[in-house]
């Protein structure tokens, strides 16, 4: 199993890149793919063209409410109930299954529930060839150990100094994380021609591994305008060609 996490500051196009990477893996047809939407806004399903009925956050809150009210079915262990509900929440699609993490914790105590959820999600992930995690801004889900060790971290940035600075900080955080992060790469999304010298210098200063860039693609905006899934982009679409080239570098050993 290979786990790829997509990270970066808000608004950089992480979800689009995650969706196009999933499209590549699906089109490559070399194994099953589990997509984990770890962003509370939960819109990876729209990119993938899948409906979403429940999230892990919904299940956690519902279970805690049942336990608190004493309405859990007699004889049913909480771990078994969570396992059943997680499998119910798993959305099956053509070439990819989706699990959305949903909203973060509320004011109550979540340690026991989260530990159970980690065990269940880890066990579920082991049955897939690839796991692609679309993170919220920052690395919260990784730092909270909501997911397994990460083989590849793709940090998506816009072509700005602020974006590159954020990417540099995230690499620093990833180096301290348990679970561990393997290789990390920088992806520049929607650059306007050649990168300015200041940005190139910042990339070098933060020791970021720039693996490629994804150009502005009018087709993505057109698809978004009418709610058409991004994974339905044609093979010749510039953004998909760029992500495909990045993925081939990643899976062929990186830079």
Image: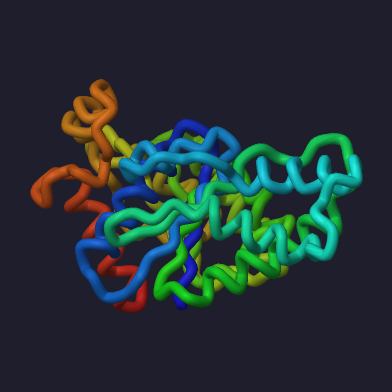
Looking at this view, is 11 or 159 the one in front? Answer: 11
* Image quadrant containing the C terminus: bottom left
Would residue 255 be seen by someone viewing this image from the given angle?
no
Answer above or below: position of 235 versus 12: below
- The spot of residue 64 in percent (x, y) is 82, 46
* Left or right, 236 with reference to 174: left
Residue at the image point whose x is 80% and y is 36% from the top: 106
Q: Furthest-left residue in view? A: 236
Q: How is the image coloured?
A: rainbow
* Left or right, 254 with reference to 184: left
Looking at this view, is 153 or 3 the one in front? Answer: 3
* Left or right, 199 with reference to 85: left
- The spot of residue 69 in percent (x, y) is 90, 40
Looking at this view, is 187 or 208 the one in front? Answer: 187
Residue at the image point whose x is 24% and y is 32% from the top: 228
* Left or right, 127 with reference to 192: right
Total label count?
0
Looking at this view, is 210 or 72 the one in front? Answer: 72
Residue at the image point whose x is 30% and y is 37% from the top: 191
**Quarter holding residue 102:** top right
- The spot of residue 243 in percent (x, y) is 27, 54
Residue at the image point whose x is 82% and y is 40% from the top: 65
Q: Furthest-top residue in view? A: 225
- The spot of residue 148 in percent (x, y) is 61, 68
Would residue 114 be seen by someone viewing this image from the given angle?
yes
């Amino acid at each position: 199993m290979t786990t790829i996490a997509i990270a970066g500051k808000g608004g950089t196009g992480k979800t689009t890149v995650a969706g196009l990477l999933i499209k590549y893996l699906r089109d490559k047809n070399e194994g099953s793919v589990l997509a984990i939407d770890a962003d509370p806004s939960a819109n990876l399903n729209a990119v993938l063209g899948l409906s979403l009925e429940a999230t892990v956050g919904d299940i956690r809150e519902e279970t805690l409410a049942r336990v608190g009210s004493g309405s859990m079915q007699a004889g049913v262990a909480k771990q078994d109930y969570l396992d059943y509900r997680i499998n119910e929440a798993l959305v099956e699609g053509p070439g990819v299954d989706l699990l959305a993490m949903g909203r973060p914790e509320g004011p109550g105590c979540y340690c026991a529930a989260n530990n159970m959820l980690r065990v269940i999600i880890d066990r579920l992930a082991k049955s897939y060839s690839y796991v692609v995690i679309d993170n919220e801004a920052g690395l919260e889900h990784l730092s909270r150990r909501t997911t397994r060790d990460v083989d590849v971290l793709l940090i998506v940035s816009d072509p700005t100094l602020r974006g590159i600075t954020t990417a540099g900080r995230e690499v620093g955080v990833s180096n301290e994380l348990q679970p561990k992060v393997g290789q990390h790469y920088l992806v520049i999304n929607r650059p306007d021609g050649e990168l300015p010298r200041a940005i190139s210098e910042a990339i070098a200063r933060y020791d970021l591994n720039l693996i490629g860039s994804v150009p502005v693609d009018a087709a993505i905006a057109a698809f978004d305008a009418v709610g058409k899934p991004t994974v339905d982009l044609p093979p010749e679409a510039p953004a998909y060609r760029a992500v495909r080239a990045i993925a081939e570098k990643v899976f062929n050993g990186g830079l």
